[in-house]
Image (cartoon, rainbow, N blue to C red):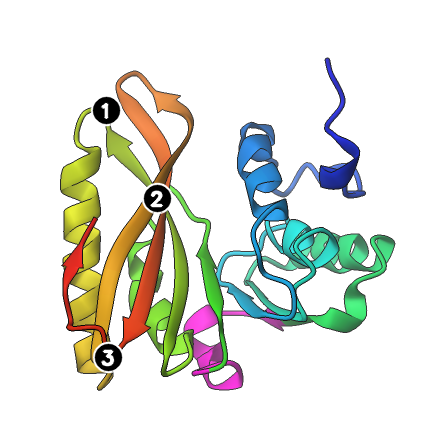
Amino acid sequence: PTPPPPHTHTHSNPPNPKTMFASGNGTERMRIARLPAAGETVVDLYAGIGYFTLPYLVHARAARVHACEWDQDTLLALRRNVQANGVAERCVIHFGDNALSLPCFEGQADRVSLGLIPSSEAGWPLAVRALKEAGGWLHVHGNVASGAEDVWCARLGVAVRALAAEAGRDWRVVVRHLERVKSYAPRVLHVVADVLCQRGAGGESGR
């Protein structure tokens, strides 16, 4: 197989047989590496062994990543991986239920990664509250029936705006991009929606 380009390489320890390893997420890891996140604070609500945490820190040059993980075996691999890549000092790891960790990063994030499939919807309220009051980006993963992407994006936009209103934030919410990561099953796609939330921009939701 062709090796990844140098600018997307990160060192990861071999996966522990007790943890999940998703090799099909390679294209999304490379996309994250190119995001303009330098100097930003990122919250990774479902960090795993660092699939997306590491590209944010090593290549996108995020100033800090709050990485949430509740499986103990996976947590050990995550700690090893951030140390092996020399970014441990910029990664704050939160062990346990990410909802209980919210006070540690509420209102601080420029971006929130919701890398959980088949659905990350349980994390949407946390993600909205993690963003800065002025807004920011949500990178929302989900499994969607092929052909139903527009319907899913519209529902996502409406839901995020409602959650923002509940949190007292008058945001314009727009799905700026939909990335089709891979085929998850026959006629089911793993997608990522890049959702931009902006304060004082009229409250519109859409794509």
Q: Secondary structure at mark 3?
A: loop
Residue bounds of the magenta highlight: 94-107
Q: Position of residue 72 (x, y in %)?
A: 64, 59
Residue 20 seen in the figure: no
Please indicate whether residue 96 sits to the left or right of residue 119 in the image.
right
The residue that mark 1 highlights is 146
Q: Nearer the viewer, mark 2 or mark 1?
A: 2
| N-terminal-most mark, 3 or 2 | 2
User: Where's the N terminus, which quadrant?
Assistant: top right
Residue 154 seen in the figure: yes
User: From what the image shows, is residue 136 above or below residue 47?
Assistant: below
Q: Nearer the viewer, residue 35 or 119?
A: 35
Give yes or no for contact between labels 3 and 1 (Cβ–Cβ under 8 Å): no
Q: CA distance from mark 3 to mark 1?
A: 34 Å
The residue that mark 2 highlights is 177
Q: Residues within 10 Å of mark 1 (few under 14, many from 20)?
A: few
Q: Residues within 10 Å of mark 3 (few under 14, many from 20)?
A: few
Q: Nearer the viewer, mark 3 or mark 1?
A: 3
Marker disc for residue 195:
none
Q: CA distance from mark 2 to mark 1?
A: 16 Å
Q: Residues within 10 Å of mark 2 (few under 14, many from 20)?
A: some
| N-terminal-most mark, 3 or 1 | 1
Queried whether the magenta region covers residue 95, the answer comes back as yes
Give yes or no for contact between labels 3 and 2 (Cβ–Cβ under 8 Å): no
Queried whether the magenta region covers residue 2, the answer comes back as no
